[in-house]
Image: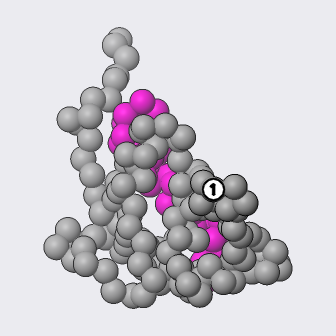
Amino acid sequence: MKTFVTKPAEVERSWYVIDAEGQTLGRLATQIAVLLRGKHKPIYSPSVDCGDYVVVINAEKIQVTGRRLDQKKYYRHSGYPGGLSEITLRRQLEIYPTRVIESAVRGMLPKNKLGRKMFKKFKAYAGPEHPHQAQQPVVMEL
């Protein structure tokens, strides 16, 4: 019996639409990361990008538990001395609602070239509209 090895040409990609309204941030991000990596497929291989495309709508209506809206902070640095800036989750959802879910999903993917390639298949939109109707995405209930 021979061992099956997944080749990039054998991978078939699907498109999924996920509505983030009322979903908990971390639980939603883990399920999105599984779809992006392809771990839900029987041909999964850690060294090959087997994942599907994921479109998230209503990213601004994501929910978190506890006091995370005020306690969780996002940091970024300008590269200059003293250039560290922070923003709370509540403020981040007001200004850039898609960045919240993007950073959660990015943190659950591999930190290498393959992870960056997987992340390019992820699309997030603040409202209920998205421009990917031509790909005939499947609505996924979580």
Question: Mark 1 Cα within 10 Å, few/some/many (few <14, many 20+)?
Answer: few
- Give the magenta-colored segment's residue range: 22-50
For this rendering, which residue is in front, 43 or 33? Answer: 33
**Residue 140 image point, x, y percent:** 41, 71
The residue drawn where x is 34% and y is 22% is: 4
The residue drawn where x is 81% and y is 75% is: 71
Residue 91 located within the stretch drawn in magenta: no
**Residue 136 image point, x, y percent:** 21, 71
Q: Is 112 above or below relative to 125?
A: above
- Image side of residue 61 versus residue 91, left or right: left
**Residue 16 image point, x, y percent:** 35, 66
Q: How is the image coloured?
A: one colour
**Residue 23 image point, x, y percent:** 60, 78
Q: Is 130 above or below relative to 25?
A: below
- Image side of residue 129 versus residue 81, left or right: left
Q: Which residue is mark 1?
A: 80
The residue drawn where x is 60% and y is 54% is: 79
**Which quarter of the picture shows residue 31?**
bottom right
Q: Looking at the rendering, in which quadrant would you find the N terminus?
A: top left
- Image side of residue 81 versus residue 35, left or right: right
For this rendering, which residue is in front, 78 or 98? Answer: 78
